[in-house]
Amino acid sequence: MRFAFTDDQRAFADGLHDLLVHEYPPARLREAWAAGRGHEPDLWRRLADMGVLSMMVPGPAGGMGGTLVDSVLLFQQLGRAGVPGPVVEHLVAAPRLAGTPWAGGVVDGSVVVTAALDVDPFVAHADVAEVIVTPSGARHGYAVSAVAGLDEGRHLAEVTGGTLEPLPGTDELADTLAVATAAFLVGLGETMIDLAGEYARQREQFGKPIGAFQAVKHLLADALLKVEFAKAPTYRAAWSLSTAQPTAGRDASMAKALAGEAAYRASRAAMQVHGAIGYTWEADLQLFMKKAWALQRAYGDARWHRRRVSAAVLATPR
Amino acid sequence: MDLTYTAEQDAFRAEARAWLEANVPAEPLPSFDTAEGFARHRQWEAKLSAARWSAVSWPEGYGGRGVDYIGWLIFEEEYFRAGAPGRVNQNGIFLLGPTIMEVGTPEQKARFLPTMASSEIVWAQAWSEPNAGSDMAAIRSTARLDGDAWVLNGQKIWASRAVWSDWCFGMFRSDPDSQRHRGLTFFLLPLDLPGVTVRPIAQLDGDTGFAEIFFDDVRIPLGSNLGEVGKGWNVAMATAGFERGVSLRSPARFSTAADRLIELWRTHADSTDDALRDAVTDAWMLAEGYRLHTYQTVTGMIEGRPIGSEASLNKIFWSEMDVRIHEIALDILGPHAERMDGPLERWVDGFLFSLAGPIYAGTNEIQRNIIADRVLQLPKGV
């Protein structure tokens, strides 16, 4: 029993964190929004070079050969930076394209792949993706009809037509996507709390920083509580999937339900702490809040995932 | 990351399970907040200790088994699974014991730890005062040097199990000119000394689980202090860290409660009530989340990443979870939740007890302040 990451896993995630802090501050994300870019080709290449995009692609196929446990901290860091584009979807879908014409391209990043589940009415990032991995297989050659989305770093579309190639390894697509998204949501939650903390330290009212008031302290402490207690279930779910535990589906759903709710609580607390500024287009907070609000309901919302946990936990006497 | 148990851990679990199955009393003991219950619980502790199960994470020399925190969690899982009695000496074994191991003199370790493990001496925590609750640094009880003795005066309150306990531990102001956190000393003393008066206080559940303790010129020998004279605050914070962190409320307690809640839901709830089904699922996820979080924390402690102010997050989490689990149970019982003498009374009792959690060991409001100040680095408040 050892519930911790290895030094290597931590170091890789720290390296990604450093890259994103320097290369992708909120100002860059804001620029992408302003330019109508839902995907960042420059950053994408950096992530490909670093091995992030091919983290879960097996070594013989040119990838990093990592498991979901190796990757879960990366999803969290990508979430911390609010990285737009199909990063979560690509990382999860890429290993499932082994033996297809896209296998090489998804490793070096020249092919962008996204993922979609039946529960979701739209496909995210279909506008930039060459192929969509779904539980039924790989879909390509489709037509895309854009749908305006809440998070401008996540372009939505209705997809029609195209060809579906069956894939052998899509069984755990939904669960893996749920865990990866949960980790991304945890990262978003951390950043929203950080932004609120920064604001509460500098904004003064009644002659002192508002962070000195207990009403503000307690709001953020409660938000942090939810985010911190979503982490271990997310990491456990990553382990359950990596090691094919019989509880993997239940654990993935628990993670997604808790992380989605935690990120939502963090968004509400952070916005309240920002006051009127939090309701503006200018505040960086919105870049992260809107992604959290989109992702908390994508790939199964908390209600859907909770019912799945119910079915596992309440159905049969243990 | 490997969330499976080693063969050694499995063997330890099997040994604990076998012993508990053979030895846990078939009938629940009376509450340890009653005279008879206290005596019965002390006997149980003696039995546990004789088989070296009372303090498994302690070194063998003090009556433990020297297992790491993972071993301790495994033992706790088995203990709650077996429905074994509550731990009447928990303030000693789980709070004071680790503190003595950290800061005690060799003489104190030799004298107090074995008798603690066996519950020959049961310890009460003399912590709060009438005007020092959340604001613990406002302590007024005094300790004055007089020749070869310290002389204690003042009053402590909400001292759990002080009515029947043998010894107590608490802080006194040893420097009369000191303010706040400075000039406090942490003392260990018997409760049967001349000048000590223990007055029981009936709790919300009617039992006298806690008490006031009055000190009138109580003389205790020099060397009764734990840690340095004047450094009592630091000693107390170490104890409080254990209490808020992992030791006082092990995850097994809540995993077991969540399992019982599921059983109650199966036998008593309308299974078509989706809101209730979701609530029970949430309770299970809370308990499971706490279990996972604790395994993560404990792995960190074993690997030299000690728990800091994040311990305050644990305290809020488990205390609110405990209330929530019991609220849901009472929702399932509906109008029957009013009944106190039926087979399900345990849930009502548990609900009353759970309500103390957000208050003791530092109110949850104080914990939120600690998180805001030390983890989130917000400016100090008033």
Image (cartoon, coloured by chain):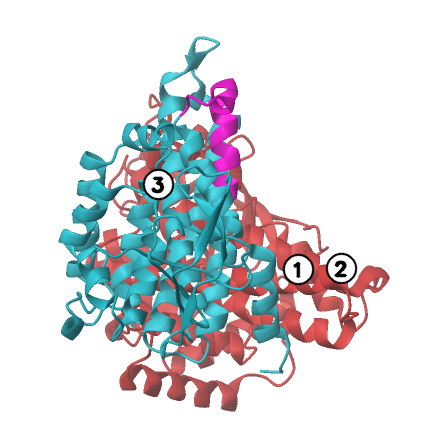
Chain colours: A cyan, B red
Secondary structure of residue under mark 1:
helix
Q: Is residue B273 left or right of residue B100?
A: right
Q: Picture coordinates of residue B361 (x, y %)?
A: 48, 46
Front label number (1 vs 2): 1
Q: Which region shows up in magenta?
A: A264-283
Q: Which residue is mark 3?
A: A82
User: Do we see residue A280 in this rendering?
Assistant: yes
Which of disc 2 and disc 1 is earlier in sequence? 1
Residue B282 spot, x, y in % from top left: 59, 60
Contact (Cβ within 8 Å) of mark 1 with mark 2:
yes
Q: Between residue A82 and residue A210, name the one nearer to us.
A: A82
Q: Amino acid at mark 2?
A: Asp
Residue for badge 1 = B279
Q: Is residue A37 above or below residue B303?
A: above
- Principal secondary structure, stretch drawn in magenta: helix
> Dot 3 surroundings within 10 Å: few (below 14), some, or many (20 or more)?
many
Between disc 3 and disc 2, the foreground one is: 3
CA separation in Å, label 1 and label 2: 10 Å
